[in-house]
Image (tube, rainbow, N blue to C red):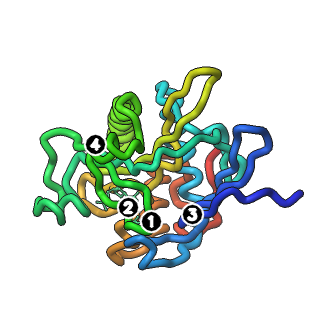
Amino acid sequence: MARRKKIYEGKAKILYEGPEPGTIVQYFKDDATAFNAEKKDVIEGKGVLNNRLSEFFMAGLTAIGVPNHFLKRLNMREQLVRSCEIVPLEVIVRNYAAGSMSKRLGIEEGTQLPRPIIEYCLKDDALGDPLVSEEHIAAFGWASQQDMDDILSLALRVNDYMSGVMYAVGIRLVDFKIEVGRVYDGDFQRLIVADEISPDSCRLWDIETGRKLDKDVFRRDLGSLTDAYTEVAQRLGVMPKGATGMMKPTLIN
Ligand code: TMP
Ligand code: ASP
């Protein structure tokens, strides 16, 4: 196969030029990082699981009419996505207090919030993705008021979808992060959900036991990350029950 042109390499994914204009191949690596890459490891099979899980969530969003970049899965580690201009914000939706919000505001982890709370962080690794307000976003022109209305609507729709899908398999969606991208259709531009939706970018707790099934397992050294992600994949029916965490993952198509 001819060598593809690498467009960008991030901490967990590599983007290659796609086969047609306006497309990108998104490759999921096994690398795991936390605390702005201060903590790093390679977790065998993580990329395969996240590729499949992100496909599952994005395809589900497409089915209910939430626009996103996913086009199709190509193989175990790659998916074809629509190319877009990433808005330089991490959009976080929280249903229960956890992580940085618990630390910042002194709210015990697991406390149910009175309503979903949306936070924005500037996508800037050198600054450690700082929390920013809508005032900052408007004043510095990172997104327009129309963009912010659209981002809020997308984020809440993703939250309702993901909360329901997870609840159905006994998992609480505590919080998650999405990224959005801008696409142009003729004279019109609109925002779509981009990047990935996976246990790397969500907090997922077993409803019965509280067991963490997301990247906090890695951040906080709580055991096998592959086992946790495999559990999520199995409950959602994207990997057969009985498959072990160590990858020879026979993924259900
Ligand atoms: P936080 O509590 O550390 O701010 O994280 C909130 C949510 O965002 C959590 O589900 C994990 C996710 N997240 C990312 O996807 N990428 C990141 O770089 C960070 C810090 C959090
Ligand atoms: N993605 C971020 C990093 O690599 C942080 C995190 O997910 O905790 O450092």
Find residue 80 and report its horizontal and vertical position in percent: 68, 44
Alpha carbons under labels 1 and 3: distance apart: 10 Å
Mark 2 = which residue?
Answer: 129
- Image label count: 4
Find residue 130 and report its horizontal and vertical position in percent: 32, 60
Q: Residue at x 62, y 52 (%)?
A: 251
- Cβ atoms at labels 2 and 4 below 8 Å apart: no
Three-letter code for the amino acid on which mark 1 is drawn? Asp
Residue that lies at the very extreme toward the top in this rendered image: 187
Alpha carbons under labels 3 and 4: distance apart: 26 Å
Q: Residue 134: which disc?
A: 4
Residue behind label 1 places its C-beta within 8 angstroms of ligand 2: yes
Mark 1 = which residue?
Answer: 125
Q: Which numbered mark, 1 or 3, is in the foreground of this view?
A: 1
Three-letter code for the amino acid on which mark 3 is drawn? Gly
- Viewer-closest of 206 and 68: 68
Q: Residue 210: which disc?
A: none
Classify the position of the C terminus by image quarter. top right
Q: Residue at x 59, y 40 (%)?
A: 84
- Cβ atoms at labels 3 and 2 below 8 Å apart: no
Query: SS at mark 2?
Result: loop
Q: Residue 10: which disc?
A: 3
Residue 164 visible? The answer is no
Q: Taking 94 as reference, is 11 above or below it?
A: below
- Viewer-closest of 97 and 45: 97
